[in-house]
Amino acid sequence: MKNILVTGGAGFIGSNFVHFMLNKYPDYTIVNFDTLTYAGNLENLTAVEKDPRYRFVKGDICDAGQVTAALKEHAVDTIVHFAAESHVDRSITGPAVFVQTNVVGTQVLLDASRAHGIERFLHVSTDEVYGSLGATGYFTEETPLHPNSPYSASKASSDMLVLAYQHTFGFPGLVTRCSNNYGPYQFPEKLIPLMIANALNDRPLPVYGDGLNVRDWLYVEDHCSALDTVLHGGTLGEVYNIGGHNEWKNIDIVKLVLKEIGKPESLITFVKDRPGHDRRYAIDAARIKNDLGWVPAYQFESGIKRTVQWYLQNRPWWERIISGEYKNYYAAQYPVQH
Ligand code: NAD
Ligand code: TYD
């Protein structure tokens, strides 16, 4: 493994992964293949843009010609596939692009990778493919897939394509399913950065429904170290759940963010629930821990502190986002606040 193509490397987790890998492996090269949708931001990578081990290729995973050319030109032997439409709310208002990017894009990438003779293909997926839990229990890799949103349905489809290619063609695929991530460079449409940005601007904090939905949160660098572990040590054709055993009710997260920033709870506003809102996610990560020896490094309280600090120190990064085209999305998504 030497020449890795990272799809979606200009997004939240992808850009953290590019930094992580360049720091850890001095002799690897990373090609970041990204079409730069609203969620892709090359500012996430300014620190490495002059690094000779890093290349950016503006390309669309749905375009077989562009993918094949990048694989050849950079003699790629390994792919880590992040590129996707990733926001559940957007999948409810506009599902088509989710099917196009997440399903068709993955199939195009798989065919091009097969033809090229790729050595290892890591597909980055989500615990949301398992659906919703009640008050107890955990998702294991054997939990039946039961995706509830257009986003999770498109991710489940792409997971199944990777596993079917492995089964049918002996394709060297691996699948990971991680819980909710948080940390630097997360687009402020997602819960934690949205609440941080609104709190810093003294704007209402919109909590969906009763605020009692539960998510299992993992610091993004821990996700990156887990992906690195699976990439190097995982068994081909296997699925690995990734999570930090860290369940939080949404309302408690929002209160924690307010406390960290020193703003009053009166900013919290309960708004109309998300249609089909999954109640609870919780990951059993025994396989990656027991078989591959992975352990997360960050406690939630310290991870949240680091994240709030990052958004405080990088105000221009998210202020440019919330003053641009994202403004129209926000006005449509949260109409009562306008
Ligand atoms: P993101 O929305 O921040 O970034 C997605 C990136 O993909 C962007 O840079 C975008 O420009 C790029 N992209 C979109 N369509 C493309 C296309 N057709 N061709 C090339 N590039 C394209 O997403 P994220 O939160 O970093 O998530 C990355 C991956 O991790 C996704 O596959 C997501 O399903 C998965 N995941 C995310 C989380 C989470 O909490 N964010 C948790 C588990 C799994
Ligand atoms: P989100 O960050 O969109 O991740 P996902 O839906 O993929 O888990 O949302 C996390 C949780 O926060 C989810 O239960 C929905 C809730 N939420 C709000 O209450 N208000 C908001 O403005 C957003 C974006 C999310």
Image (cartoon, grey):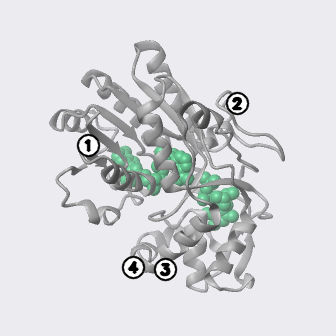
* Label 1 packing within 10 angstroms: few (<14), some (14-19), many (20+): some
Taking depth in this image into account, of 72 and 298 the one nearest to the observer is 298
Judging by the rendered image, the residue that carries numbered circle 2 is 143
Taking depth in this image into account, of 186 and 66 the one nearest to the observer is 186
Please tell me which of labels 4 and 1 falls first in the chain. 1
- Image position of 222 with respect to 4: above or below: below
Q: Secondary structure at mark 1?
A: loop
- Image position of 122 with respect to 128: above or below: above
Please tell me which of labels 1 and 3 falls first in the chain. 1
Which numbered mark, 4 or 1, is in the foreground of this view? 1
Q: Secondary structure at mark 3?
A: helix
**Amino acid on which disc 3 is placed:** Leu
Rounded to the nearest angstrom, the CA distance separating label 3 from label 4 is 9 Å
Q: Quadrant of ligand 2?
A: bottom right
**Amino acid on which disc 2 is placed:** Thr
x, y percentage for residue 83? 41, 45
Rounded to the nearest angstrom, the CA distance separating label 2 from label 4 is 42 Å
Indicate the quadrant containing the N terminus: top left, top right, bottom left or bottom right: top left
Number of the label disc, if any, that sits on residue 316? 4
